[in-house]
Amino acid sequence: MEAIKLSIVVPVYNSEECLPEFNIQIEQAFVGFPAYELILVNDRSSDNSWKKIVKVCEKNKKALGITLRKNSGQDNAIMAGLKFAKGEHIVIMDDDLQHSPHDVLKLYNECLRKGSDICYARFSDKKQKNWKNFGSWVNGKLSEKLISKPKEIYLSPFKVFRKEIAQEMIKYTGPYPYIDALLLTITHNISQIPVEHYSRHKGKSNFNLVRSVSVFLKHATGYSVYPLRLAIYIGFIASLFAFIFGTYFLIEYFIHENKVEGWISTILLILFFGGTILICLGIIGEYVGRIFLTINRKPQYTVEKVTSNSITNVSE
């Protein structure tokens, strides 16, 4: 049996309208490249994505379908796919055809040519809302500080990396994996190539602003102690502000003999310091909560069913 050269891992969530066309393009893109597998991980979609995955597996002998028992998040679903991947290289891409299957081999060949551990796709013009573009920019800048991202690298969700890297990644058993942080923890032997970013094939994006911010905060506190250091800086600045404020009032009282009315200044100080304390406690609480969940071994995901042409333990 020929060794699998490439595993394509795709997290799927509410994409029933995209999956048939996605499979067609995969089969077209890999004509003459038989040594690949397609792994579709259903992150407990609320639509008929699982049924579509089953049908894809019936048509495409190289496809494998996995469905999770509960919605665990995109990165958790990817981790599930990585544990099933057998390829010498692994591709991660979205299910909505904003990442073209026809560009997969470009990334793969670039990774082989450069001898890099990871090859990211770089999008010059992203077909998405402006707030997402701004969020990507902010995420990139913060990632330079939080997870030591090289400045010239764009952390694209479309990438290919070596099997040895994936084997190191799946050793992580914490409940909140962050794929790019795990990759950058393991290696900085990275390359990237420009590819086109397309409009979503059908439907609408599953990420809104609130969900994106929530995911980012979980990632930020999962792979860096910088937020804790930030809490120290906030506390120091607040203390310095209080010292300056207090010095000013003392000078006004003893030198200029001006009595400072206390009600407004007192309320402002209470609000300022109260808010500062709550922010710092929130940051510390996030870390404590993560420690609690890790100690109690909260699972990253739980697989319910697996299907392919050779596996039949699936019920629709």
Image (cartoon, helix red, strand yellow):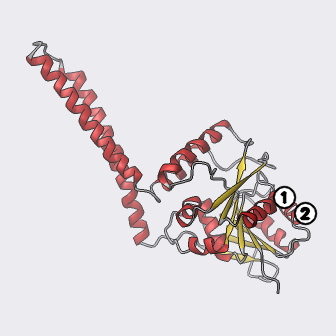
Can the viewer see residue 291? yes
The kind of residue on which mark 2 rests is Gln
Residue depicted at x 62% and y 53%: 155
Left/right placement of residue 57 relative to residue 120 reads: right
Left/right placement of residue 256 relative to residue 164 reads: left
Splitting the image into 4 quarters, where does residue 40 fall? Answer: bottom right
Point out which mark residue 62 bears. none
Q: Taking 168 as reference, is 202 above or below it?
A: above
The kind of residue on which mark 1 rests is His
Residue designated by label 1 = 102
Q: Nearer the viewer, residue 187 or 175?
A: 187
Residue depicted at x 84% and y 58%: 102
Quarter of the image that includes the N terminus: bottom right
Q: Give the secondary structure at mark 2.
A: helix
Q: Nearer the viewer, residue 30 or 173?
A: 30
Splitting the image into 4 quarters, where does residue 75 fall? Answer: bottom right
Q: Residue furthest bottom?
A: 1
Can the viewer see residue 44? no
Marks 2 and 1 close (CB-CB < 8 Å): yes
Q: Give the secondary structure at mark 1.
A: helix
Dot 1, crowdedness within 10 Å: few (<14), some or many (≥20)?
some
Residue depicted at x 91% and y 68%: 31
Quarter of the image that includes the C terminus: bottom right
Q: Residue furthest front?
A: 114
Horizontal and vertical percent position of residue 150 = 56, 52
Splitting the image into 4 quarters, where does residue 17 fall? Answer: bottom right
Residue designated by label 2 = 28
Residue depicted at x 52% and y 64%: 185
